[in-house]
Amino acid sequence: MTGRHDGPAPAPVAEPVTASVEDCIEAPKDQHAIAGTAVGAVVGGALGKEIGDSDLSTAAGAAAGAFIGRRLQKRMQENRAERQAAEVAETGCAPGSSQ
């Protein structure tokens, strides 16, 4: 015997592919919080107009509303990402898939 094996070669052992949590979490669709900023500006401007009935109060209300709207949307997006991360940690996800 020469040590040759005429049978089929053994199949290579595939290492499990693991995906990181970041691979499984969707990025926010509105990363710059434009929607929250715009809605906040409109609502804030309307409230400023009602309160002060001047251009200055309207502008101040719009600026404050835009700031608040942007912060609220960012917070909502962070909460969503945290929920997704917890779900991925609990159930896992396939590499390359998004939820």
Image: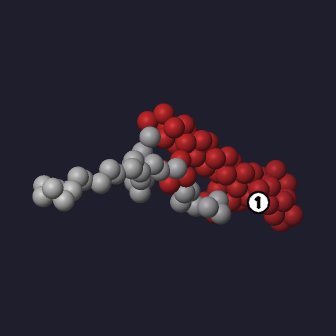
> Please, which residue is most extreme toward the top here?
90
| Residue type, numbered disc 1 | Ala
Quick one: quadrant of the N terminus?
bottom left
The residue that mark 1 highlights is 62
Along the horizontal axis of the image, is 15 left or right of 84? left
Image location (x, y in percent) of residue 43: 69, 54
Q: Total of numbered circles in the picture?
A: 1
Which residue lies most toward the left here?
6
Relative to the observer, which residue lies in front, 94 or 15?
15
Work out whether 32 lies above or below 26.
below
Asked whether the viewer can see residue 35, the reply is yes
In the image, residue 87 sits, relative to residue 5, either above or below, namely above
Check the image and name the residue furthest to the front: 1
Of the pair 8 and 74, the residue shown nearer to us: 8
| Circle 1: element type | helix
Q: How is the image coloured?
A: secondary structure
Packing grade of label 1 (10 A; few <14, some 14-19, many >=20) is many
Relative to residue 42, is residue 5 drawn left or right? left
Residue at 64% x, 56% y is 36
Image location (x, y in percent) of residue 97: 40, 54
Give the residue displayed 47% in from the left and 50% down from the top: 19
Residue found at x 67% / y 46%:
75
Is residue 80 at least partly visible in the picture? no
- Residue 96 sits in which quadrant? bottom left
Instruction: Please tell me which residue lies in front, 43 or 34.
Output: 34
Residue 98: image location, x then y, percent: 42, 53
Q: Nearer the viewer, residue 18 or 31?
A: 18
Residue at 61 percent across and 49 percent down: it is: 77
Apparent side of residue 26 relative to residue 55 in the rendered image (left or right): left
Residue 13 % position (x, y):
32, 50
